[in-house]
Amino acid sequence: MPKRILTGTVTSDKNEQTVTVIVERRYKHPLLHKTIRSSKKYRAHDAKNEFKIGDQVRIQECAPISKTKRWEVISA
């Protein structure tokens, strides 16, 4: 099964080797037919601490690294 790849924006880089990425998705409401924006935060592994707040990054699923990290940053 292929690993999921998501694109989002870094919102926090305060932790060592970890960035918080917010991923926004848009979908149409089934009854009202209005476009809805929803977002979710993911904690991703950044081994070299190279990404800063505001960077657009791509994250990929991986094996659990810690209690909350199941994603790793693959590129900017």
Image (cartoon, rainbow, N blue to C red):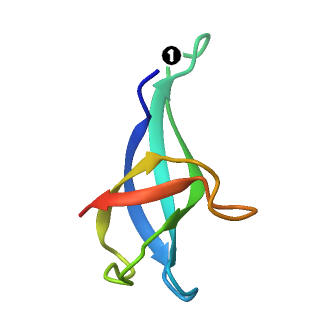
**Would residue 68 appear left or right of 37 to someone viewing this image?**
right
Residue found 62% across the figure and 10% down from its top: 31
7 over 47 or under it: above or below? above
What is the total number of numbered labels drawn onto the structure image? 1
Callout 1 secondary element: loop
Residue found 56% across the figure and 20% down from its top: 29
69 over 10 or under it: above or below? above
**Location of residue 49 in the rendering, given as x and y in whole percent from the top left corner:** 39, 84
**Would residue 3 appear left or right of 36 to someone viewing this image?**
left
**Location of residue 75 in the rendering, given as x and y in whole percent from the top left corner:** 25, 60
* Quadrant of the drawing holding the C terminus: bottom left
23 over 17 or under it: above or below? above
Q: Residue at the far top: name it.
A: 31
Nearer the observer, 12 or 65: 65
Q: Quadrant of residue 43?
A: bottom right
**Would residue 65 appear left or right of 5 to someone viewing this image?**
right
Q: Residue at the far left: name it.
A: 76
Residue type of the residue flagged with mark 1: His
**Location of residue 1 in the rendering, given as x and y in whole percent from the top left corner:** 47, 21
- The residue under label 1 is 33
Q: Quadrant of residue 56?
A: bottom left
**Location of residue 35 in the rendering, given as x and y in whole percent from the top left corner:** 46, 29
